[in-house]
């Protein structure tokens, strides 16, 4: 825990100022105005008092120890201030001052020295270049933010100080309470990993929300986030979602992966709820802080207008949740209470003239029905509608067993109702779609919390055989592993690979083909040709020796025309696979989070539509199947319009074997099995082509 930082009894402010508007003045004022009950010690060699408090010229004049030091002096004085703070007993230090690694190498070096000095003495450092922190439960505003939130149960950490002030203003404007608000700044010491761990154990925090631009250690983050998310929800807005630079990738997997995708995969693994926008960050946090988690996917919609009800139903279905009708006997009881024109289907339409009692009847019906897991309640302003009374009645009759998310649509007319919802701790959204998005986040998190234990299967393999091939390539500085050797590695990991061999002339090719049987495919083998099809380096369905010879000669002619300087090792002759659905599985190694596995359908789905999904290795059988389900084209695998579905388990096993291979060999930085041909149930998937890229030493 970080008691000296989050709940100090004695705070020194080095750089305290008598001038309003100065950071050192505003921090003292905020501590006083926030009601901080501990001791505040201003430090300024040129002042006798600050805001009525005795001011010390330096900390050495103190006759007692401090818990927390807040430093707001110019950069050149920061290191001496840190040293004197530690001598005075500080166990935590906040450096507000900017001008460190964000401005260049000199600042970066000074920041490193300060962090190392603190670490060597067991002192925790927040910042530098930060806004400070607020602990509303402790009545402590140790920041230069202008507002103090009321105590609540949402804690926020942010890499951006400016976003902290926006979060604070938003929370105050919505009368939303906060527990902690932490500006991390440059994260020289304390980072998101530390605050995830600390806040997960904080009894005053029910939901952890965060804004991140980067993560210091991928593995440490996943470990801390997974442990924290097992205790309470984590909602993170991750900025910097595009690759600023050009990624030199030789595989489909590498070219489709990016920085943002790796963060998404890490969040999925660790149970973090990802917010795509600033609004979503608090939409999700509010719902999670105020309502219980749903126990299933079934949602009831209660509305006083048809159109918004349809909007909600569409959003529910599109999100993967389910719109289900009330049980027959409950629907009959509700129908007896509502006007004849009302609808007890789903959405439940209580009509535009609905008084509070009608909303309560519908709410009670949804709460009574065990088949309903969540409720979305919508109100639009009509001349006869009293939003405030309806809000109070709904809040009074809510049992707290199922989540209720409310959308009072409109502006001025529904404002009294929104104020009542806030007072009753009911999450309110301006549109049904935003309410449903929050409900989807809650449901996904609930499902993650109830996930089965992660058991990663280890298959019996010939690891030594793969190790020899990889070591040979690295010694020879051959970092692109050709199809022939890549398939040897796959065979070592018990992938089903078609029989084949390499030939260096047409006669050898014919001998191989007649040994393994026609029809065959031939593929060029060259370290200079990565994308064989683009260069005319693939010929398929060669049914006899004459077709094979013609195909061989034509291939060599075209490659010589397109790439006359390419080094040609030979031609790989391979038995043609049975027809099936072509998919791609692959891996790219992210520098932060390690091997990211990729799955997608082959052909246009990967080339044009980029319909792929990523997951971090190592992977379980359940997670591998979940990868398939998250693609838009998943239904094609299960069979549509009379087509027979494919063996999904064989794809999942292939992904798991790939996961084991790339986990065993960190030397592999990119890999594709494309196409991975999958047939009907009971037929093993076949690795028809493969490419591996190794890491240069």
Image (spheres, rainbow, N blue to C red):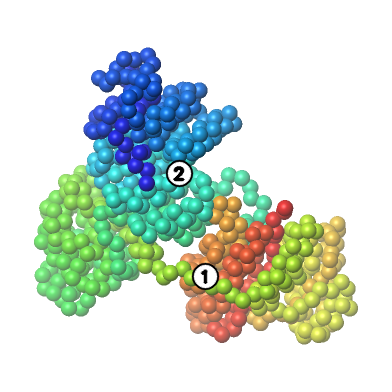
Q: Where residue 636 appears, x then y in whole percent?
A: 52, 74
Q: Where residue 93 appears, x then y in whole percent?
A: 41, 34
The residue under label 2 is 191
Considering depth in this image, is 548 or 32 the residue closer to the camera?
32
Classify 10 Å Cα crowding around label 2: few (below 14), some (14-19), many (20 and above). Answer: many
Q: Secondary structure at mark 2?
A: loop
- Does residue 587 appear in the picture of this structure? yes
Q: Which image quadrant is residue 355 in?
A: bottom left
Q: Is residue 349 left or right of residue 14?
A: left
Considering depth in this image, is 41 or 619 the residue closer to the camera?
41
- Which residue occupies 69% across, 56% down? 695
- Which residue occupies 24% across, 64% down? 402
Q: Is residue 51 above or below residue 675?
A: above
User: Which of the marked residues, 2 or 1, is nearer the chain's N terminus?
Assistant: 2
Q: Which image quadrant is residue 666 in?
A: bottom right
Q: Secondary structure at mark 1?
A: loop
Q: Where residue 199 appears, x then y in whole percent?
A: 35, 49
Q: Is residue 397 left or right of residue 220?
A: left
Q: Is residue 686 left or right of residue 477?
A: left
Q: Is residue 61 above or below residue 247?
A: above
Q: Is residue 274 above or below residue 691?
A: above
Considering depth in this image, is 264 or 552 the residue closer to the camera?
264
- Which residue occupies 13% across, 53% down? 392
The residue under label 1 is 456
Q: CA distance from mark 2 to mark 1?
A: 30 Å
């Amino acid at each position: 825990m970080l008691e000296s930082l989050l709940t100090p009894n004695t705070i020194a402010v080095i750089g305290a100022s008598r001038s309003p508007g100065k950071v050192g003045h505003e921090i003292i004022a905020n501590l006083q105005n926030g009601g901080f009950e501990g001791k505040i010690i201003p430090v300024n060699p040129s002042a006798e008092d600050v805001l009525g408090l005795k001011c010390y010229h330096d900390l050495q004049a103190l006759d007692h120890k401090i818990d927390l030091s807040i430093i707001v002096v110019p950069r050149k004085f920061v290191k001496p201030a840190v040293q004197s703070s530690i001598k005075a007993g500080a166990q935590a230090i906040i450096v507000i001052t900017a001008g460190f690694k964000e401005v260049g190498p000199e600042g970066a070096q000074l920041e490193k020295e300060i962090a190392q000095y603190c670490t060597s003495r067991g002192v925790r450092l927040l910042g530098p270049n930060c806004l400070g922190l607020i602990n509303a439960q402790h009545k402590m505003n140790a920041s230069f933010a202008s507002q103090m939130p009321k105590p609540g149960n949402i804690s926020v950490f942010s890499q951006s100080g400016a976003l902290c002030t926006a979060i604070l203003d938003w929370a105050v404007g919505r009368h939303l309470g906060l527990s902690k608000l932490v500006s991390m700044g440059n994260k020289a010491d304390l980072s998101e990993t530390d605050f995830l761990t600390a806040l997960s154990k904080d009894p005053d925090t029910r939901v952890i929300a965060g804004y991140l631009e980067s993560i210091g250690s991928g593995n440490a983050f996943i470990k801390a986030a997974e442990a924290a998310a097992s205790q309470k929800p984590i909602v993170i807005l991750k900025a910097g979602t595009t690759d600023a630079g050009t990624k030199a990738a030789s595989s489909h997997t590498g070219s489709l992966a990016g920085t943002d995708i790796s963060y998404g995969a890490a969040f999925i693994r660790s149970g973090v709820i990802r917010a795509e926008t600033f609004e979503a960050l608090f939409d999700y946090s509010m719902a999670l802080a105020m309502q219980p988690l749903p126990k299933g996917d079934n949602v009831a919609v209660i509305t006083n207008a048809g159109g918004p009800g349809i909007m909600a139903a569409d959003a529910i279905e599109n999100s993967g949740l389910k719109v289900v009708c009330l049980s027959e006997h409950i629907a009959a009881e509700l129908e007896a209470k509502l006007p004849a024109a009302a609808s007890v289907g789903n959405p439940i339409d209580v009509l535009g003239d609905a008084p509070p009692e009608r909303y309560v009847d519908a709410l009670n019906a949804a709460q009574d029905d065990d088949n309903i897991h969540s409720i979305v309640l919508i109100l639009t302003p009509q001349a006869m509608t009293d939003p405030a009374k309806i809000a109070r009645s709904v809040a009074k009759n809510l049992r707290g067993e199922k989540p209720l998310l409310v959308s009072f649509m409109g502006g001025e007319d529904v404002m009294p109702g929104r104020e009542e919802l806030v007072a009753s701790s009911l999450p309110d959204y301006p549109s049904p779609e935003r309410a449903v998005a929050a409900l989807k986040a809650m449901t996904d998190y609930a499902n993650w919390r109830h996930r089965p234990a992660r058991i990663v299967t280890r298959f019996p393999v010939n690891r030594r055989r793969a190790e020899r091939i990889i070591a040979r390539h690295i010694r020879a500085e051959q970092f692109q592993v050709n199809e022939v050797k890549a398939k040897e590695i796959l065979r070592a990991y018990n992938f089903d690979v078609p029989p084949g061999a390499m030939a260096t002339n047409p006669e050898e090719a014919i001998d191989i083909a007649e040994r393994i049987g026609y029809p065959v495919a031939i593929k060029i083998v060259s370290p200079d040709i990565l994308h064989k099809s683009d260069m005319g380096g693939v010929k398929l369905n060669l049914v006899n020796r004459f077709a094979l010879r013609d195909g061989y000669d034509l291939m060599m002619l075209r490659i010589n025309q397109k790439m006359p300087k390419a080094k040609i090792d030979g031609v790989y002759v391979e038995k043609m696979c049975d027809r099936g659905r072509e998919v791609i599985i692959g891996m790219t190694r992210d520098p932060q989070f390690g091997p990211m596995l990729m799955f997608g359908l082959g052909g246009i789905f990967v080339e044009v539509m980029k319909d792929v999904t990523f997951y971090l290795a190592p992977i379980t059988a359940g997670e591998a199947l979940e990868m398939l389900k998250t693609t838009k084209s998943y239904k094609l695998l299960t069979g549509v319009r009379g087509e027979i579905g494919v063996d999904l388990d064989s794809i999942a096993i292939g992904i798991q074997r790939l996961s084991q291979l790339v986990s065993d060999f960190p030397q592999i930085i990119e890999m594709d099995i494309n196409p991975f041909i999958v047939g009907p149930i009971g037929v093993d998937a076949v690795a028809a082509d493969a490419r591996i890229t190794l890491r240069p030493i």
